[in-house]
Image (cartoon, rainbow, N blue to C red):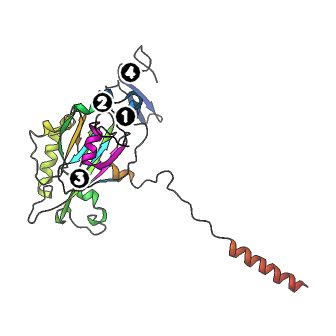
C-alpha cells in the first residue's frame, strides 16, 4: 500500500485505492489513538486488547448477585438485585461471570483467585465507577422472532406482556458487550416505543448523533431515564474507557453461523449386518453349486 508519510508504516493523509475493476474503493485513513487503556494492562497482555479475528461470543447469563468481569479489571454489575441479564462479549479479552463480592475482590486485587486479572499491580486502588448505563433501547421485535413476525404468530410488540431492552457497552479500543434483558410490563403501562412515540424517539436519536460516545453524562442532559429500564453500573480504572450506544444486535447476526469443531457429518451406517448377510448368501450359493 502506498505511503504518503516518509515514516514507514504510517499514513499522513487519506489514500483512495480502487479494487474490483472500479466497483469498490478502499480509503486508507490516518490512524487514530486507541486511548491509554493499555497503560493499565501488563505488557505481556497488551496484545490481547486488539481484536484480530471475528468474535463469536457465547451467551452468558448474569444472574442476581453476579457481575461480569472482562480481563479481571473491568466489571459490569446490574443494579437490580432480581433481574437476569444476557451478555455477549464482543471483545478479545476474556469474560468471566462470578459473584459480585468475588468480582470486587478480583478487580481490586485484594482476593486470590484462579480468574486472571491482566491489569498492572496497583490498578485495583484506582478502580472507580464509570457511570450507570440503562438498557433503554427496545429490541422486542428483533428478539422475539416468530412471535412478532407477520409470517408466523404476528403479535404486535406493544401487545406483549413484556419488553426486551438492550444496549451496547463500549470498551475503548477493544470492542463492546451486548446486554439484553426481558422486563415485564406493569398493568396499564403504555409502551414507550409504541407506534405513536416511535417517530419522536428516532428524531431524538438523530439529534443526539455522536454524543453517545462520550458516555452517559452528556445523555442525561436531554434524555429522561425510565425507572423501568434495567440499569448496569460499570467499574473501570480511573472510571474511564467506557460508553454506551444503541445495540447493533450483533449476536443475532452471528448465532446462526456454524463454528469450528461443531460440524459433524452423518454417522456411518454399520456394515455388520450387511457383511453377515453377504456371507450367508455366499454359503447358500456354494451349497447349491455342489
In the rendered structure, find residue 49 and report the number of the disc placed on it.
1
Q: Is residue 80 left or right of residue 269?
A: left
N-terminal label among 1 and 4: 4
N-terminal label among 4 and 3: 4
* Coordinates of residue 211 in the picture (x, y in percent): 18, 35
In magenta, the rendered stretch is 86-111
N-terminal label among 2 and 1: 2
Please name the residue that numbered disc 4 is placed on.
Answer: 11
Between the residue at mark 2 and the residue at mark 1, the CA separation in whole angstroms equals 9 Å
Residue drawn at x 39%, y 54% is: 255
As drawn, 82 above or below 10: below
In the rendered structure, find residue 65 and report the number of the disc placed on it.
3
Examine the image and state in which quarter residue 186 appears: bottom left
Q: Are marks 4 and 3 in contact (CB under 8 Å)?
A: no
Can you name the residue that lies furthest to the right here? Answer: 290
* Coordinates of residue 89 in the picture (x, y in percent): 33, 45
Neighbour tally class for label 3: few under 14, some 14-19, many 20 plus, Cα within 10 Å: some
Between the residue at mark 1 and the residue at mark 4, the CA separation in whole angstroms equals 22 Å
N-terminal label among 3 and 2: 2
* Coordinates of residue 209 in the picture (x, y in percent): 19, 38
Q: Is residue 133 left or right of residue 20?
A: left
The mark lying in front, picked from 3 and 2, is 3
Q: Are marks 2 and 4 in contact (CB under 8 Å)?
A: no
In terms of secondary structure, where does tag 3 sit? loop
Amino acid at each position: 500500500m502506498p505511503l504518503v508519510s516518509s515514516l514507514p508504516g504510517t499514513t499522513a493523509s487519506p489514500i483512495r485505492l480502487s479494487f474490483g475493476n472500479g466497483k469498490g474503493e478502499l480509503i486508507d485513513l490516518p490512524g487514530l489513538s486507541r486511548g491509554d487503556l493499555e497503560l493499565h494492562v501488563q505488557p505481556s497482555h497488551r496484545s490481547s486488547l486488539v481484536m484480530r479475528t471475528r468474535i463469536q461470543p457465547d451467551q452468558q447469563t448474569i444472574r442476581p448477585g453476579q457481575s461480569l468481569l472482562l480481563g479481571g479489571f473491568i466489571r459490569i454489575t446490574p443494579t437490580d438485585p432480581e433481574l437476569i441479564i444476557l451478555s455477549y462479549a464482543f471483545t478479545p479479552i476474556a469474560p468471566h461471570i462470578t459473584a459480585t463480592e468475588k468480582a470486587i475482590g478480583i478487580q481490586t486485587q485484594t482476593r486470590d483467585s484462579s480468574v486472571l486479572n491482566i491489569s498492572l499491580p496497583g490498578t485495583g486502588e484506582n478502580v472507580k465507577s464509570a457511570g450507570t448505563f440503562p438498557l433503554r433501547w427496545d429490541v422486542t421485535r428483533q428478539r422475539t422472532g416468530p412471535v412478532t413476525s407477520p409470517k408466523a404468530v404476528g403479535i404486535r410488540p406493544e401487545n406483549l406482556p413484556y419488553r426486551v431492552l438492550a444496549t451496547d457497552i463500549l470498551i475503548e479500543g477493544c470492542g463492546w458487550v451486548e446486554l439484553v434483558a426481558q422486563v415485564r410490563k406493569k398493568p396499564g403501562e403504555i409502551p414507550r416505543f409504541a407506534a405513536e412515540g416511535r417517530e419522536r424517539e428516532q428524531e431524538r436519536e438523530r439529534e443526539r448523533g455522536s454524543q453517545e460516545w462520550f458516555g452517559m453524562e452528556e445523555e442525561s442532559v436531554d434524555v429522561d431515564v425510565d425507572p423501568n429500564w434495567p440499569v448496569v453500573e460499570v467499574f473501570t480504572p480511573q472510571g474511564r474507557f467506557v460508553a454506551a450506544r444503541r445495540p447493533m444486535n450483533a449476536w443475532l447476526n452471528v448465532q446462526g453461523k456454524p463454528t469450528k469443531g461443531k460440524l459433524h457429518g452423518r454417522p456411518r451406517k454399520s456394515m455388520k449386518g450387511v457383511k453377515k448377510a453377504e456371507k450367508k448368501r455366499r454359503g447358500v450359493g456354494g451349497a447349491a453349486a455342489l
